[in-house]
Amino acid sequence: MSVTSESVTEEPDVRAVLRLAYGGQFAKALAEAVRLGLPDLAGDDFVPVADLAAATGTRREVLDALLRTLALAGTFAPDGAGGYRLSAPFAPLRADHPRSVRNMCVLMAGPYTDAFNGLGRTLTGGESGFRGVHGADLYPYLTEHPETAAVFDAAMAELCRPTAHALAGAYDFGEVRRVVDVGGGDGTLLDALLTHAPWLEGVCLDRPPVCARAAARPHAAGARLTFRPADVFAEVPADGDRFLLKNVLHDWSPDLQLRLLENVRAALARTEGARLLVLEPLFEGEEGAAHALAQMVICHDGSRPFTAAALRALFDRAGLAPLRTERLACGHHLFECVATSRPQGRPGPRERSAGQSAQAGQTPR
Ligand SMILES: C[S@@+](CC[C@H](N)C(=O)[O-])C[C@H]1O[C@@H](n2cnc3c(N)ncnc32)[C@H](O)[C@@H]1O
């Protein structure tokens, strides 16, 4: 269902217009199929729709329409005799697939797509559509909606796995002892790194409910991985010789990005030789536009896609200097940064006046 400029011809194409107009319906139908476990139930062999309806407690004729709708998008294949199976390219909808993105589908079709009802607000005022629609920014909203929050954590973990693999292959952790993941979610990235490098220990800093959920789950790294509840806009309260910030900075307005980096810089200063590894997607190419729009609608007021130049300018303002930049196989860009000596006259995070802190906005939790 992807729309690229290649698929656009010079002829009027009402079907193409309507296919796009129906897009939201497909996303919601896909998410409901995932919630019902249909990709797991309809295996490699055809399963009669009556059996699927019985297993999911749904009405056969409605379920049949749902499956036929998703068959239009290639998700399920009908056998023409009332049976369906999952099409091979959609295997990542299954819960047990190693590259499963089932939670991302549910998150995308739910609060993220709903946030696009606030697109007009983003277009005219530049503000978060998410906040306009849901009455709260993303993270306070998740605190109030624990079920969605668990889906969010799992969705982030799904997207994290290829990055963990790519980072472990691209970065030498040989001399490193302790890694602190700032806004590290459910610890998937750290768990993978610690499994790859069994001499490492890791501290995952995140909001209290995220840490509580994550700490209750088993991790391959066992006791080497710990979770510490924190508000990283107030302080980065852990020491280590490498700090990670993956897919965190772009969530925030420029003022809050700066505040966060200054707090990380203060933490770097506590350990000699400490470095910060920033991993961010830089939205490039045709498909980057859709990611960029989603970021503007869903993230904090004023969040905009990074270019490499914008990130470098932000690092500079925060007193950080990138030593190395690399595009990883997963598509993320890795910036390895050190703290620079702060230019005279520029205040550190703890030295800011109350007026300056207020300008930077409320701590977003
Ligand atoms: C987009 S997610 C990225 C998670 C993880 N780094 C990854 O790449 O999968 C941003 C994370 O920042 C966390 N976060 C948001 N506000 C925070 C705060 N004030 N203090 C600590 N963590 C926060 C969120 O709970 C979430 O886990």
Image (cartoon, rainbow, N blue to C red):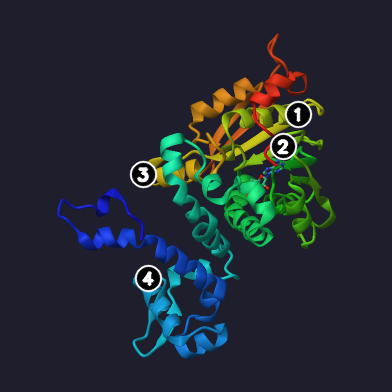
- Quarter residue 356 falls in: top right
Q: Which residue is mark 2?
A: 243
Labels 2 and 1: the sequence-earlier one: 2
- Quarter residue 323 falls in: top right
| Mark 4 → mark 2, Cα distance in angstroms | 42 Å
Q: Position of residue 202 (x, y in %)?
A: 78, 46
Image depth: mark 4 or mark 2 in front: 4
Q: Which residue is mark 3?
A: 286
Q: Residue at x 44, y 63 (%)?
A: 27
Labels 3 and 2: the sequence-earlier one: 2
Labels 4 and 2: the sequence-earlier one: 4
Q: Quadrant of the N terminus?
A: bottom left
Q: Secondary structure at mark 4?
A: loop
Drawn side of residue 197 relative to residue 160, left or right = right
- The residue at the far left in this view is 11
The label number, if any, that marks residue 268 in the structure image: 1
Vertical relation: 165 (above or below) 23: above
